[in-house]
Each structure stands twice: as C-alpha cells, then as structure tokens.
Amino acid sequence: MKTMQKASPAAVRPLAQSSPWISLGGTLLVGLFVAQLDRSNLSVVLPQLSKDMGFAGDPFPVTSSLVLTTFLVGYGLANILGGVLTRNVDPKPIVTWCFALWSLATIAVSFSNSLLVLLACRFVLGVAEGLYWPQQSRFARAWFAPAHLTKANSVIQYYGQFIALSVGFFILTPIYDYFGWRTLFFLSGLVGLVVIVPLFSAVLRRESEAPYGAPFVEPTPPPKISALAEPGFALLVFSFVTQGMLFWGITLWIPLTVRSLGFTGWGQAAASAVPFLVAVLLAPPMAAISDRGGRRVTVACLGLLGPGILLLLLPLVSDGYGKLLLISLALGWYGSSTIANTWAILQQSIDRRLVGTASGIMNGIGAGGGGTLAGFLVGLSNQWTGSYTGGFFVLGGVVVLGSAALLAAARLLAAKVPTT
C-alpha cells in the first residue's frame, strides 16, 4: 500500500489563474490609493478644521504639527510591533481588518468637534496602517520572483500611494471646498468600508497559495529576530529614516507650502500634486532600469543624492515657481528611484520568514520616526523663519547622508546569501 504524500501548493494550484500583477498587485494598488487619501485629507482641511477645533492663530504651528504627526507616532509603533507579532499570521485577514478599523476611525472624525477625539482617531489610523504596511512586503516576497521585486514593490507599495498624492488633491480639495471637512472625512472612511474591505475579502489570497510562499515543511528552524542585529540592516534603517524625513516632511506640508508660495484654489491643488505626478511619470523607466539592468543600488543611491542637492539649492531661488520646480524634481526623483528599490534590497537580503518583521521595523523607525521628526522640523521652521522651504533645505542635507548610508548598507547586505 502506497503512502499518500502531501502535495505542494504549486501542485494543487490550477494552471489557469489570473496574473498576480492584476489580481494581487492591482487590488493592493487600489487599496493603498484609498489609504493614502485617508492620510492626506487632514493636510487639506487644516485651515478650517483648526478654527472649528480652536487651535487657529498662535497655537497653529505647534498644534498642527502635533495633529499631523500623531498618525506617524501610531504608524511607527505599529509597524515595529506589528511586523514582529504578525509574522506567523496570514497577511490577508490582517490587511482586511486593518482597513475596516481605520475607515471607522476616519468616519468618527466627521462627527466630532474635539481635538482629543481627532488625535485619538489619527492615532488609530496610524496604528491600523502601521499593521497593514509590513504585510505588503510579505505579499510581494511571496507572489513575485526575485528578479521582479522592484516592479512588484512599485505596483504594491508605490503606484497607489503616489497616484493618490498626484491626483488626490483634485479629489479631496473640491469636496472640502464645496461640502466641508466633515463630509470629506465621512466619504473617505466610507469608501474603505464599502469598497476596499469587500474587495480584499473577495480577491486577495492566502500566503500558503503563493509560488514563493511558505513551504509545507521548513528546511531549517525559523530564524530569531536577533538575526536582524547587523550593521547592514542598521544602515539600511538609518537610510530609510532620512527617506521618511524627506517624504513626510514634504507630503505633510505641501498644501500649505504651495499656498505660502502664492498658489491658491485650484492652483494650490495643482501645485500640491506636481511633485507626486513627476514621481509617477518617472517610476516605470526607473523600475525597468533597476530590475533588468541589475542597477538597483545605483539608481536608489542617486535617487537620494540628487534630490538632496536640489533641496540644498532652494535658498538660491526666490521665485515661487522656481522653488516648486526644485521641490517637484527632488520628490519626483526620489519617489521614482529609491522607495521600491530600497524595499527590493531588503526583501532579497533578509530571510523570507523575517521579511514582514524587518519591513515593519524599517518602516516604523524610518517612516514613523523620521516622518514625525520631519513634520515638526518643517512646521517649526515656518514658525521661526516664516518659510516652510527652510525646513526642506535641512532635509536636503539629511538625505545626502542617507545616500551614503544606503550604499554602505547594500554592500554589506550583498555579502549575505538569503537562506530561502
């Protein structure tokens, strides 16, 4: 009598299957698009919301910095803890329930006049999105071949976010102008509940079904988290801190920055979108060069060095259009060249079973910590100097250091051979 052997996931998976680029990548792209709108809506409504909640005038610089960065505090903590605590839980239910939670928190803001409630809801938004983010790296690592990781990360963790930032202000600003901030928050959360949560439940698939997911029997014991305590990973995290400062320092304050440069109304919406539109347009060729040419490290490092130099040139330009051009080229170059490649470098260098944990730590410290620091830096820069771009100048010097750290990290990590 023959012994029945357990079939591998690949053996039981039907041959005729929708492409993961569409079913998984497209679904997560749409999800991140809506997630980014939920993050960005506060930046659009701050002028009126601050009056309604009593922190307009002198308290505005400090209180608005606190309000904007509360999300990042929760986001950073949840990325780190979530990446560790969820590494043995399938990512599909995590992303689905997290989306439902932060959608409810977003809706709750629309019914409140309390600054404390706003802070609490933004913290919940940060926690839920922080738990959500590391799962995207797990989806990318499990469903796409190593040679396609930059492109996969562009689809899963990049396009949705930057498309939302490039066109989102044209969606959010008119709703705010015509219906007010309460309606904007209510609609933002409602879309997540009635569109994204059902979409995730119906389309996303479990990690055990993925071609590069967990095998039925692991060849070696699962690695300990202490395996991440190495110089290469530490330098990669430091580089991502500088990246978080660049991205969030500009993103949180871009609507008010362009207003200070003389753009109002639809012009403000258009000017706020330009940096992210540049990133979206440059992303496809940069991803192709990175994956096909094997130049991930070079493209990523130049994507920090070049933008840093551009931001350092800001004090030399007095014209509002000139400053917007430098800011747009800097963020567009960085966004299209460095983000997806940094995630690909991490995913290829870390044991597959630690990818979610490492992603959470890196994004928690980098985006959460770096973004919070940059949010206050730019806000206080405006209070002290009357200019948001003074803070952007400081960010330019920071990301030049980040470029050097990324190069050193990539060289140290390249010496390692992933176990899976």
Image (spheres, rainbow, N blue to C red):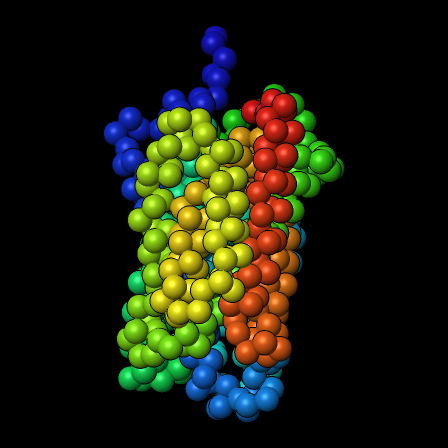
Question: Would you place residue 190 above or below residue 297 in this image?
Answer: below
How far from the left and from the top, in percent, is residue 387?
Answer: 53, 74
267 relative to 94, above or below: below
| Residue 134 location (% of width, % of height) | 54, 48
Left or right, residue 290 beside residue 388: left
Location of residue 354 with respect to 281 vertically, above or below: above
Q: Residue at x 28, y 75 (%)?
A: 266
From where the camera sits, is residue 119 visible? Answer: no
Q: Is residue 390 visible?
A: yes
Does 278 sit above or below residue 70?
Answer: above
x then y, percent, for residue 103: 44, 68
Residue depicted at x 53% and y 51%: 308
Decide which of 75, 139 is in the foreground and name it.
Answer: 75
Task: Give the position of the C terminus as an image quadrant.
Answer: top right
User: Residue 94, percent across and down?
Assistant: 51, 52
Q: Nearer the viewer, residue 295 or 67?
A: 295
Q: Splitting the image into 4 quarters, where does residue 194 fall?
A: bottom left
Disc tally is: 0
The residue that appears at 42% across and 58% down in the rendered structure is: 326
Residue 372 quadrant: bottom right
